[in-house]
Image: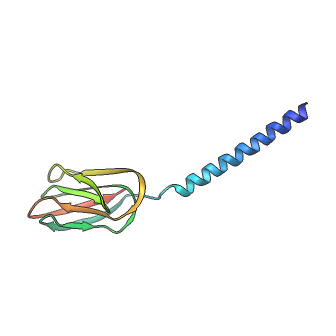
């Protein structure tokens, strides 16, 4: 009886260890590698002009305009607009995607913009 019980426990522990290993491997492979990365830093945009950053893995972006409000996004995703000059607008996606971040001057005239992905 002890041998039978011991063999069941060992078998169950082996199955549990294998399932846990597979789960950890799947999580490691699916996790994106997004990290903070600036784009369009110091660019001067005018009259609702856009600046695009290089495509990268990101889970969101943020930005601000020195003289005007700005709008942000990534690829076709619109992240909204800041409330005024110097105010940071942040867009969080909730998951990592591979996309091209952008920032737009939200007024006529010229503004200096700064964007960052995370």
Scheme by which the image is coloured: rainbow
Residue 99 x, y percent position in the rendering: 37, 63
Q: Residue at x 68, y 47 (%)?
A: 19
Which residue is painted at 53% across and 56% down in the image? 30
Asked if 20 appears above or below 46 in the picture, the reply is: above
How many labels sit on residues?
A: 0
49 with respect to 115 (left or right): left
Residue at point 37%, 58% (across, down):
36
Answer above or below: position of 13 versus 52.
Answer: above
**Residue 98, percent across and down?**
41, 62
Q: Write down the quadrant of residue 73 in the picture.
A: bottom left
Residue lying furthest left in this view? 109
Counting from the top left corner in percent of width and height, residue 68 is at: 13, 57
12 sits left or right of 43 in the view: right
Which quadrant does the C terminus fall into? bottom left
Task: Report which quarter residue 43 is drawn in.
Answer: bottom left
Outermost residue toward the front? 76
Q: Quadrant of the N terminus?
A: top right
Residue 72 placed where, x, y %?
25, 57
């Amino acid at each position: 009886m002890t041998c039978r019980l011991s063999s069941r426990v060992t078998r169950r522990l082996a199955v549990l260890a294998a399932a846990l290993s597979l789960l950890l491997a799947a999580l490691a492979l699916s996790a994106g590698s997004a990290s903070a990365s600036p784009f369009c830093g110091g660019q001067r945009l005018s009259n609702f002009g856009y600046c695009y950053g290089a495509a990268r893995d990101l889970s969101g972006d943020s930005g601000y305009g020195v003289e005007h409000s700005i709008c942000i996004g990534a690829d076709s995703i619109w992240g909204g607009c800041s409330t005024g000059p110097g105010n940071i607008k942040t867009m969080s996606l909730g998951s990592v995607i591979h996309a091209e971040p952008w920032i737009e001057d939200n007024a006529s005239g010229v503004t200096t913009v700064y964007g960052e992905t995370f």
